[in-house]
């Protein structure tokens, strides 16, 4: 079985990244993290990668004259590592048209809600305010919208009566990590096809 290469982009503590690093330690998982990139320096996500001996890079939007130039530079750098898949793991910047064009159908991201419900940055809070009984996390293929791409996998998390945004989000994150590791491994090992709104693995 050939090992598939992924590049992971992070903006913060990198707990999803750590779950992937741990999974990749098993050769049967079939995935190698070729590089970890970030949009800011001095974050724990980069430190996790460095401790694991994974190459890292930083591309800050402010270093470039326009968002488009940043997007192109990010695409160039990621492309240099020849990834089969790009995983946005808590990456807090929207990648642009050039990046998505370069890696069409090969960029995945997680969202802490059951898409298409509660898109945007307040997924757990919006779910709690709406009063839903279950929420969860979604892994999707990134498109030009916000959390709107074809769905790869979803995992369900019950909402407890005494939940706060923090307790709910923490349980979502635990489920999200399991889903991410499982789905990325399957995408890599079995291959996949994006057909309209459907993602077919294997």
Image (cartoon, rainbow, N blue to C red):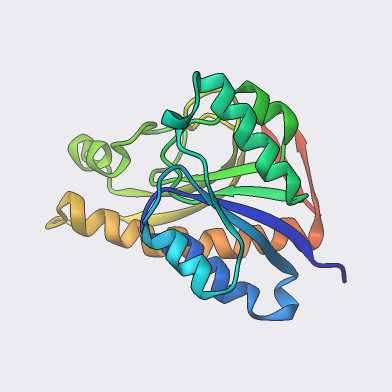
Residue at 40% of width from left, 50% of height from top? 41
Assign the N terminus to one quadrant of the image. Answer: bottom right
Q: Is residue 169 left or right of residue 79?
A: left
Q: Position of residue 20 (x, y in %)?
A: 56, 66
Viewer-closest of 32 and 29: 32
In this view, the residue farthest toward the left is: 162
Whether 200 is drawn above or below 116: the answer is below
Q: Position of residue 96 (x, y in %)?
A: 57, 25
Assign the C terminus to one quadrant of the image. Answer: bottom right
Residue at 50% of width from left, 26% of height from top? 64
Q: Position of residue 32 (x, y in %)?
A: 70, 66
Viewer-closest of 92 and 77: 77
Residue at 27% of width from left, 40% of height from top? 127
Q: Is residue 130 left or right of residue 67?
A: left
Q: Quadrant of residue 54?
A: bottom right
Residue 150 can be seen, yes or no:
no
Residue 156 can be seen, yes or no:
yes
Q: Position of residue 45 (x, y in %)?
A: 43, 60
Viewer-closest of 190 and 128: 190
Whether 77 is drawn above or below 25: the answer is above
Q: Is residue 177 left or right of residue 81?
A: left
């Amino acid at each position: 079985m050939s090992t598939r290469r992924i590049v992971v982009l992070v903006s913060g503590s990198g707990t999803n990244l750590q779950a992937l690093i741990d999974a990749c330690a098993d050769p049967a998982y079939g995935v190698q993290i070729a590089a970890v990139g970030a949009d800011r320096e001095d974050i724990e996500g980069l430190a996790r990668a460095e401790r694991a001996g994974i190459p890292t890079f930083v591309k800050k939007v402010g270093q470039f004259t326009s968002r488009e130039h940043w997007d192109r530079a990010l695409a160039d750098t990621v492309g240099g590592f020849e990834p089969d898949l790009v995983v946005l793991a808590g990456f807090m910047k929207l990648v642009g048209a050039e990046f998505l064009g370069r890696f069409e159908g090969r960029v995945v991201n997680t969202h802490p809600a059951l898409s298409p419900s509660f898109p945007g940055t307040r997924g757990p809070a919006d779910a709690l305010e709406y009063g839903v009984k279950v929420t969860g996390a979604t892994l999707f293929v990134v498109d030009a919208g916000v959390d709107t791409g074809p769905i790869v996998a979803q995992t369900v998390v019950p909402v407890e009566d005494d939940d706060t945004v923090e307790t709910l989000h923490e349980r979502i994150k635990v489920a999200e990590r399991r889903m991410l590791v499982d789905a990325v491994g399957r995408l890599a090992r079995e291959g996949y096809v994006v057909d309209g709104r459907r993602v077919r693995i294997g």
